[in-house]
Image (cartoon, rainbow, N blue to C red):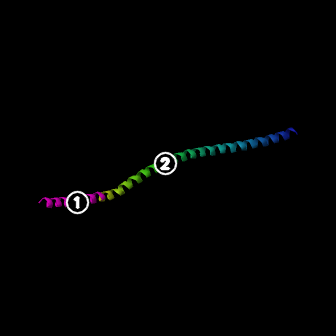
Amino acid sequence: MSNEDHSVVLERHEQMLRSLQKQLDELKAVQREIKVMNETLVKITNEIKHTNASLVSCENRISEIQSAPGRRWETLIISLLSSLLCGAAGYALARLFT
């Protein structure tokens, strides 16, 4: 091989190295973007977990609020029945002792 052949081969290798370096730089940029996207995804996942916990808490409160009128009616009915029974017992006792 002559000097000219060596210089041609060397030039090809240098071009190939520049091309590979350019590709490597592009891959590094893509890797940085992927890292940022991964960190963002972790943050979003944490926010979703907190949002889900908050939704469960809200659902529990809504269930309590929805069941409150039913408990009021039960209390009202128990109070009315107790009043009627006490009144009837009082009337019966009054009739018994008079």
- Locate the C terminus and report the quarter of the image it occupies: bottom left
Q: Determine the residue positioned at 69% across, 45% down.
A: 23
Q: Which residue is drawn at 47% across and 47% down?
A: 50
Q: Which one is in front, 20 or 74?
A: 74
Residue 24 occupies quadrant? top right
Q: Which quadrant, please, contains the N terminus? A: top right
- Residue 49, percent from left and from top: 49, 48
Residue 67 placed where, x, y %? 35, 57
Could you tell which of marks 1 and 2 lies nearer the N-terminus?
Answer: 2
Q: Where is residue 56 in the image (x, y as percent from the top left)?
A: 44, 51
* Crowd band around label 1 with a 10 angstrom C-alpha radius: few (<14), some (14–19), many (20+): few
Dot 2 falls on a residue whose secondary structure is helix
Work out which residue is located at the far top of the displayed protein and give it: 3
> What segment is highlighted magenta in the picture?
74-98
Mark 2 Cα within 10 Å, few/some/many (few <14, many 20+)? Answer: few
Task: Name the element at disc 1.
Answer: helix
Quadrant in the picture for residue 31: top right
Prevailing secondary structure of the magenta residues: helix
Total labels drawn: 2
Tell me, yes or no, whether the highlighted magenta stretch contains residue 52. Answer: no
Residue 85, disc: 1
User: Which residue is depicted at the point 41% across and 50% down?
Assistant: 57
| Image point (66%, 42%), residue name | 25
Closest to the observer: 71 or 29?
71
Tell whether 47 sits left or right of 67. Answer: right
Type of the residue with mark 2: Lys
Q: What label does residue 49 carry, if any?
A: 2
Name of the residue lying farthest toward the right: 1
